Amino acid sequence: LSGALSSTILRFRMIDPGVGWGVAGLGDFHDSFYFYLKFMEKHVTEVEVKAVLPTSGGCAVFLGNDEKVFVIYVDQAVGSAITMFIHQTPKPRPQTHDLFADVLTALGAHVERVVINEFHESVYYARLIVIAENELEEKKIVEIDARPSDSIALAVQQKAQIFVADHVWDE
């Protein structure tokens, strides 16, 4: 698939729990989540946080695998949160990422994965893939637009996978 099409596919939206997922211009898929997972296997690269280092303007988060590493610059607060989640540092009071994770848990949801899906004008963009399953509703998969810094923090906290779209990885 071309970069533009893969970018479109990475922007799934939940359109109706009974219908499933839709992709603009491609219609609905019967087992669209499985289509989504198959697509993800072929057009993204899994990465992990290799290091978080302080900088004069915040923190540098190094993401990569055995082949390559790249950096995303984040503010000091999120860089500290990522570092605390990596080292499982206890905190005296819940922070914003803890609050969001607690709300997800209370709703029967969790972060399934993060996809850093775009790089435009020196800015990275990401999507949180959240799965919710509770006694009131059947399983729902929701994609949320989020800053990569917050997405990375939540992924590390919840031990979720982090992916980078191949067209971003190749830049």
Image: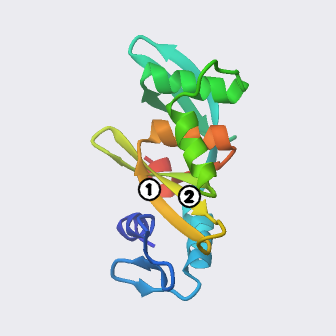
For disc 1, the neighbor class at 10 Å (few under 14, some 14 to 19, many from 20) is some
What amino acid is found at the position of numbered circle 2 in the picture? Answer: Val
The reply to whether residue 162 is visible in this rendering is no
- Helix, strand or loop at disc 1? strand
Q: Which image quadrant is residue 134 in?
A: bottom right
Asked if 34 appears above or below 44 in the picture, the reply is: below
Q: Who's the residue at 38% across and 68% down the image? A: 8
Q: Going by the picture, which residue comes out furthest to the left?
A: 121
Front residue of this view, candidates 52 and 76? 76
Provide residue 121's location: percent of width, then percent of height. Answer: 27, 41
Q: Going by the picture, which residue comes out furthest to the front?
A: 136
Provide residue 125's location: percent of width, then percent of height. Answer: 39, 47
What mark, if any, has residue 94 been given in the picture? none
Instruction: Name the N-terminal-most of marks 1 and 2.
Output: 2
Horizontal side of 108 relative to 146 (left or right) equals: right
**Residue under label 1:** 144
What amino acid is found at the position of numbered circle 1 in the picture? Answer: Ile
Q: Who's the residue at 43% across and 28% down the image? A: 73
The reply to whether residue 12 is visible in this rendering is yes
- Helix, strand or loop at disc 2? strand
Front residue of this view, candidates 95 and 33? 95
Q: Who's the residue at 68% across and 29% down the image? A: 86
Provide residue 4's location: percent of width, then percent of height. Answer: 35, 66
**Residue under label 2:** 130
Front residue of this view, candidates 24 and 90? 90
Q: How is the image coloured?
A: rainbow
Horizontal side of 134 relative to 11 (left or right) equals: right
Horizontal side of 155 relative to 88 (left or right) equals: left
Q: CA distance from mark 1 to mark 2?
A: 8 Å
For disc 2, the neighbor class at 10 Å (few under 14, some 14 to 19, many from 20) is some
Q: Quadrant of the N terminus?
A: bottom left
Label 1 with label 2: CB-CB less than 8 Å: yes
